[in-house]
């Protein structure tokens, strides 16, 4: 079984509390289904990009910069790592995740 990264992209700012509560409930249910199917590996949400610290090696030093690496309209807000037999199965789980998180985007990518 291959592993796939399901990346969740969201706009800056938090959703309304009632929307977030629905998403959390639906996401918990989907994660339970992933676990029952033996597909769940790991999942996590991320703090906003403003909490990021970027490290970049330059010659013999490492430059440390607060804030996001790039300015963007959307950012990586969370991710799920799954096991799937093939891309079709991974996309099926990705579709389910996209429905739970609508209107957010979900990107599905295989690990090397």
Image (cartoon, grey):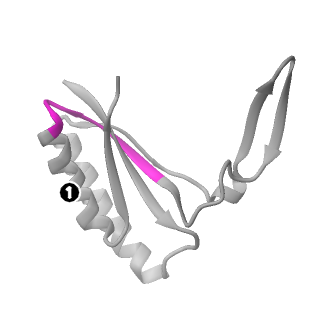
Q: Is residue 47 left or right of residue 44?
A: right
Q: Quadrant of the N terminus?
A: top left
Residue extending furthest right? 61
Q: Position of residue 92 (x, y in %)?
A: 15, 49
**With respect to residue 91, does 98 lie above or below?**
below
Instruction: Please provide the residue range marked out in magenta.
Output: 78-87
Q: Position of residue 74 (x, y in %)?
A: 52, 63
Q: Position of residue 81 (x, y in %)?
A: 34, 38
Number of marks present in the image shown: 1
- Please check the rendered image and state whether residue 79 is part of the magenta-colored stretch, yes or no: yes
Q: Secondary structure at mark 1?
A: helix
Residue extending furthest front? 59
- Please check the rendered image and state whether residue 66 is part of the magenta-colored stretch, yes or no: no
Question: Which residue is located at x 34 percent, y 72 percent?
Answer: 103
Question: Which residue is located at x 34 percent, y 56 percent?
Answer: 106
Q: Is residue 15 left or right of residue 27?
A: right
Quadrant position of residue 61: top right
Q: Is residue 95 left or right of residue 4?
A: left
Q: In terms of secondary structure, what is the magenta stretch mainly?
A: strand
According to the image, label 1 marks what residue? 95
Q: Quadrant of the C terminus?
A: top left
Quadrant position of residue 105: bottom left
**With respect to residue 11, does 3 lie above or below?**
above
* Front-most of residues 17 and 107: 107
Q: Position of residue 10 (x, y in %)?
A: 47, 64
**With respect to residue 58, does 82 lie above or below?**
below
* Front-most of residues 50 and 28: 50
Q: Is residue 109 left or right of residue 44?
A: left
* Front-most of residues 80 and 30: 80
Question: Which residue is located at x 12 percent, y 41 percent?
Answer: 88
């Amino acid at each position: 079984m291959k592993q796939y990264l399901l990346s969740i992209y969201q706009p800056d700012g938090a959703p309304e509390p009632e929307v977030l509560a629905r998403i959390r409930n639906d996401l918990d249910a989907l994660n339970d289904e992933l676990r029952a199917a033996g597909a769940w590996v790991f999942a996590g949400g991320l703090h906003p990009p403003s909490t990021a610290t970027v490290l970049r090696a330059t010659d013999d030093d490492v430059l440390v910069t607060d804030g996001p690496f790039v300015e963007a309209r959307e950012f990586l807000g969370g991710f799920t790592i799954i096991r799937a037999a093939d891309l079709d199965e991974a996309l099926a789980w990705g579709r389910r995740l996209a429905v739970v998180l609508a209107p957010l985007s979900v990107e599905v990518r295989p690990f090397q």
